[in-house]
Amino acid sequence: MTRFPKEMTENGIHYTLRGDYYFPDLALPESSRQSFGRYGRMRSAYLKGYRPGLYERLLLSGKLYDHLAETDACCSGKMELLLRQVAAAEGIDEELKAKDQLAWIGHMNNIRQRAEEIVLTETIYA
């Protein structure tokens, strides 16, 4: 019976014998795990479900968490900007809030839904 070496290097890749098979010793590159919020999690779920190739490429290159944190920051910024711009364009201001709070809440919720739909379409699902 021939004894196989425990470890070997072939084509620049280091292999270790486990049982009857050689497995490559691969490791993900070091990356800082940044925190991300709601939009980063939504982007991650979209990539896993609909763009698995891109998800794997980002994960294996160590750029996934940076991408998700950047997407989250971008979406949050877009939401704030859109909310301010649309509210100003439609005349929704602090005066309406002081006069009729329920109307102000209804208008702001409507604006928030429209802005979020724009952000999701342009950034998360792109």
Image (spheres, rainbow, N blue to C red):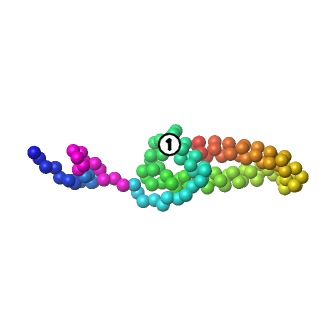
Q: Residue 125 placed where, x, y %?
A: 59, 42
Q: Say which residue appears at 43% left-offset and 52% top-offset.
A: 61
Residue at the extreme top: 50
Q: Say which residue appears at 64% left-offset and 51% top-offset.
A: 75
* Residue situated in front as seen by the camera: 115 or 105: 105
Which span of residues is magenta-colored? 17-27
68 sits to left or right of 75:
left
Which kind of residue does numbered mark 1 sit on? Answer: Lys
Residue 89 visible in the snapshot:
no
Q: Residues within 10 Å of mark 1 (few under 14, many from 20)?
A: some
Quick one: quadrant of the N terminus? top left
Residue at the extreme left: 1
Quick one: quadrant of the C terminus? top right
Q: Residue 32 placed where, x, y %?
A: 48, 60
* Residue that badge 1 annotates: 48
95 sits to left or right of 120:
right
* Residue situated in front as seen by the camera: 89 or 50: 50
The correct choice, above or below, for 34 with respect to 55 in the image is below
Q: Say which residue appears at 61% left-offset and 46% top-offset.
A: 123
